Amino acid sequence: MSLRYEGIGKATFQDGSKVEGAFTINIEPNGKAYLQLISESALTPLILSLPHEEISFQGEEIGTKGLVDIQKMYLTQIHISGVRSLLFVIFQPFAINYHEIDEHDKITLFRYLSNFIFHGDEVSNYEREWRSDKISINLEGKKITIKQVSNFKNIEDYFRMEKNPRVTCSLELQGENREIELLRELANDVENIVSFGSCNYVTLLKEEIFLEDILCKAIFYPMKTYPFNSGKPLINTNIHDIGRFKNFIITVYPQYKAKKRDLALPYVIEFFNSGKIYNILQTSFLMNCVALECLYHHYHQFKGLAKTENLAKKIEQICNDVGISYDQNDLKLRKLRNSLTHEGDFPKGINSIQEKNRLENLLDRMILTILGYGGNIYYNVFKNKEDTL
């Protein structure tokens, strides 16, 4: 998803100075965004000092007349030989507005997501083929459709060699413009659930708002991404089991929605998936410990459990409260955590892969049970096979 936008605009610095000229916005396939501005005006001493302060930008795109609105960007480079060129990096969401939308207009919201590889159970017609490329579910009275991008097969091939994040699919929702934030919240919930089930950090990189077939607004999210994880998903997404993955989303959504704030589930899932994405065993184990500590901190407050500082006791408390089994080997994970924290490595004689997988499976079972997925099939990374929760 390399994108390029050109036009005329103006950067405004915090001291009130402005730089006007022709701009180019380049958005890389991983979502990172940069703005280059060819200055038609003199550069002040503040600008030449490469200030660290936030800079805003407004401009008009050539051809479409789309209005570019960037509230926060940062100056990283200046070239003054020949033409005066300024390069900015954009870390925060920014928009291009094409048409105004009334409050009660019926809109279609498209969100373009990274790193979710799945096989659909609904067929689309392309020029030279029919392809099973999408799934649909119904939540909160809304139909949600997740559809592969047109070059999905190329991205699958790319992920076999490289792990850099790429847009793999779009999520589509419809509603009235006045409920746009509710639509976004619903989409965010689904994306976090998909992240957990697929063992990837599924990130929003771009959003489009349509009124019928007219693009009214595009919003870009050049923020945080993670590499693609080619390991086994927690819930299978292949062509034979995509129905199970859809059922997973529908089943856990009510509990996720009810508990996401009390248990800080978006943060727990991000910490947990970080441990799954990075293959250094020591780092993975410690990130899983962070996820467990985060989960326990919020869970014991939410349920009114007596607080403990002992990791083994924390595991006991959560397992007993949610009703999942554990054994003495699970409780010994505390010693491994302490060894890694204080000495930088697992104790000698320990099967580090097995113990990392033990902790990962324990967390999988905790979170799945909290989300109401008991009795269903998931991938047990400790046993290296599918299992019933």
Image: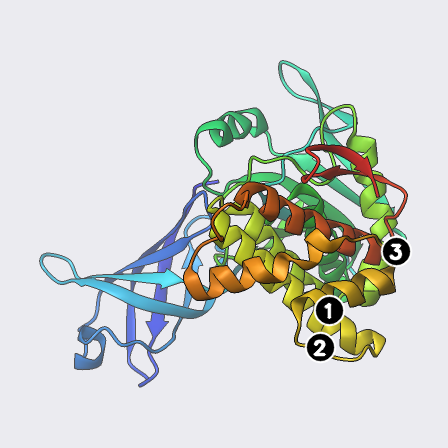
Q: Which residue is mark 3?
A: 140
Q: Position of residue 209 (x, y in %)?
A: 66, 53
Q: Secondary structure at mark 3?
A: loop
Say which residue label 1 marks. Answer: 313
Which residue lies at the image location 71% right of the left edge and 41% below the top edge?
234
Q: Depth-wise, is mark 2 or mark 3 nearer the camera?
A: 2
The residue lying at 70 percent from left, 47 percent from top is 361
Q: Amino acid at mark 1?
A: Lys
Compute the Cα span from label 1 to label 3.
38 Å
- Rounded to the nearest angstrom, the CA distance separating label 2 from label 3 is 38 Å
Residue 316 sits above or below residue 166 on the image: below
Pick whichever of labels 1 and 2 is earlier in the sequence.
Answer: 2
Q: Which residue is mark 2?
A: 308
Sequence-earlier tag: 1 or 3: 3
Q: Name the foreground residue: 145 vs 219.
A: 145
6 or 155: which is nearer to us?
155
Residue 314 visible in rendering: yes
Q: Name which residue lies at 87% across and 40% down.
A: 376
**Camera-nearest residue between 202 and 180:** 202
Label 2 CA crowd tier, 10 Å (few <14, some 14–19, many 20+): few
* Residue beneath the point at 77% across and 78% down: 301
Relative side of 64 to 180, left or right: left
The number of callouts visible is 3
Q: Is residue 376 left or right of residue 238?
A: right
- Residue 129: mark: none
Image location of residue 182, percent across then percent down: 77, 64
- Is residue 142 rendered to the left or right of residue 330? right
Dots 1, 3 in contact, CB < 8 A: no
Which of discs 1 and 3 lies nearer the camera? The answer is 1
| Residue 97 in sight from this viewpoint | no
Residue contact between numbered discs 1 and 2, judged by CB atoms under 8 Å: yes
